[in-house]
Image (spheres, rainbow, N blue to C red):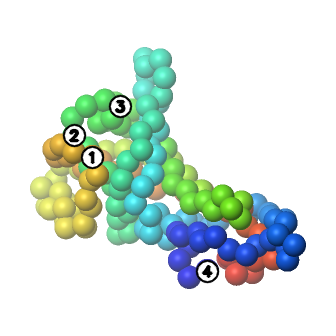
């Protein structure tokens, strides 16, 4: 598999068209970081004290390899408020192939912070992040990848090629 972030439909089934058996594989940190670097859409979840429900939002992001951090830009609003108030977040990305019934998921647990240092903001602005949502996204939020875990559902026959 040349690009671990992209799953293409593949012939994982038996010659008669039945799907083959799969297995659950744990991904090591290095592969999780590669997937984070190769993907641009994820979900952030934040539990805020005194809020009746956690905040969960889809976001596009950039992965900063030098700080091993997920970076999102945000406007002022509930997402920014929740992230700053909580100071911790869970971030998740995934890739699936529903035809072959295989896929992967990476979850980051980390400390959140708003990046306000002008030199650092300038560096982050040069990473090529292009927010999808309209509006002013003048706040950079960093989620440090303190704990990174990942799993892959893979065809049994491809065990050696997916590691």
Whether residue 138 can be seen here:
yes
> Marks 1 and 2, Cα distance to the nearest angstrom?
10 Å
State whether residue 159 appears in this view: no
Where does the image place residue 160, in percent across and percent down from the top left? 75, 81
What residue is shown at x 18% (from left), y 43% (from top)? 135
Q: Residue at x 26, y 61 (%)?
A: 129
Q: Is residue 16 left or right of residue 44?
A: right
**Residue at 70 percent of width and 81 percent of height:** 161
The numbered mark, 2 or 4, whose residue comes first in the sequence reads: 4
Which residue is the site of mark 1? 133
Label 4: how many Cα within 10 Å (few below 14, some 14–19, many 20+): few
Given residues 43 and 98, the one toward you in this image is 98
Q: Earlier in the sequence, mark 1 or mark 4?
A: 4
Q: Badge 3, how many Cα within 10 Å: few under 14, some, many 20+?
A: many
User: Foreground mark, 4 or 3?
Assistant: 4
Q: Earlier in the sequence, mark 4 or mark 3?
A: 4
* First along the sequence among labels 2 and 3: 2
Around disc 2, counting alpha carbons within 10 Å, would you say few (fewer than 14), some (14 to 19), or many (20 or more)? some
Question: Cβ–Cβ below 8 Å for labels 1 and 2?
Answer: yes
Q: Nearer the viewer, mark 3 or mark 1?
A: 1
**Tag 1, which secondary structure?**
loop
Q: State the residue position of label 3.
A: 82
SS of the residue under disc 4: loop
Query: What residue do we see at 22% from left, 40% from top?
Result: 75
Query: Depth check: 137 or 15 in front?
Result: 15
The image quadrant that residue 30 belongs to is: bottom right
Q: Which residue is mark 4?
A: 1
In primary-sequence order, the first of circles 3 and 1 is 3
């Amino acid at each position: 598999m040349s690009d671990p972030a992209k799953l293409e439909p593949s012939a994982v089934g038996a010659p008669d068209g039945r799907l083959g058996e799969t297995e659950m594989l744990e991904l090591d940190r290095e592969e999780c970081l590669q997937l984070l670097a190769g993907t641009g859409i994820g979900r952030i979840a934040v539990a805020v004290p005194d809020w009746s429900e956690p905040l969960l939002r889809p976001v596009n992001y950039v992965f900063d390899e030098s700080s091993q951090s997920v970076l999102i830009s945000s406007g002022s609003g509930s997402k920014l408020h929740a992230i700053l108030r909580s100071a911790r977040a869970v971030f998740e990305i995934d890739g699936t192939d529903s035809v072959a019934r295989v896929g992967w998921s990476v979850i980051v647990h980390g400390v959140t912070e708003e990046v306000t240092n002008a030199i650092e903001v300038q560096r982050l602005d040069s990473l090529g992040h292009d927010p999808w949502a309209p509006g002013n996204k003048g706040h950079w939020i960093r989620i440090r990848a303190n704990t990174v875990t990942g799993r892959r559902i893979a065809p049994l026959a491809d065990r050696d090629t997916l590691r």
